[in-house]
Image: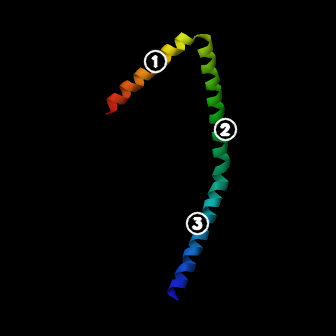
Amino acid sequence: MEAAKLKEDVRQAGRALQEGIERIQEQVGPGVRRSTDEAFSILTSLSQEVASIVRESPLLALAGAFAVGYFAARMARAVK
C-alpha cells in the first residue's frame, strides 16, 4: 500500500514539475526567440561586412587573419 501511495506522489510531483516548466517556457520563450533572431541578424551582417572586406583587399584580410591567429595562440599559451 505504501509503494502505491509513493508511486502516486511521484506522478503528481512529476506533473506539477512539468506544468511549472511549461509556464516558464511560455513566459521566457518569446524573449529568447527575439534575442536569437537579433543575434542571427547581427552575425549575418557582420559576415557580409567581412566578406566585402576580403573581396576588396585580400592581402589585408590575410594579414589580419594571421594577426588574430598569432594573438590567439599567444593567449592560449599564456593560459597554460
- The quadrant holding residue 37 is top right
**Point 58% across, 66% down: residue:** 17
**Point 58% across, 10% down: residue:** 57
On screen, residue 37 above or below 72: below
Question: Who comes first in sequence, dot 3 or dot 2?
Answer: 3
Q: Amino acid at mark 1?
A: Phe
Nearer the camera: disc 1 or disc 3: 1
Percent x, y for residue 26?
A: 67, 55
Read off the residue under disc 1. Answer: 66
Q: CA distance from mark 2 to mark 1?
A: 31 Å
Label 2 environment density (alpha carbons within 10 Å; few <14, some 14–19, many ≥20): few
Q: Where the C terminus falls, by quadrant?
A: top left
> Disc count in the image?
3
- For the residues labelled 2 and 1, say whether their Cβ atoms are less than 8 Å apart: no
- For the residues labelled 1 and 3, say whether their Cβ atoms are less than 8 Å apart: no
- The quadrant holding residue 49 is top right
**Point 54% across, 83% down: residue:** 5
Q: Amino acid at mark 3?
A: Leu
Q: CA distance from mark 1 to mark 3?
A: 51 Å
Residue 35 is labelled as none
Secondary structure beneath label 3: helix
Read off the residue under disc 2. Answer: 37
Secondary structure beneath label 1: helix
Question: Who comes first in sequence, dot 2 or dot 1?
Answer: 2
Read off the residue under disc 3. Answer: 17
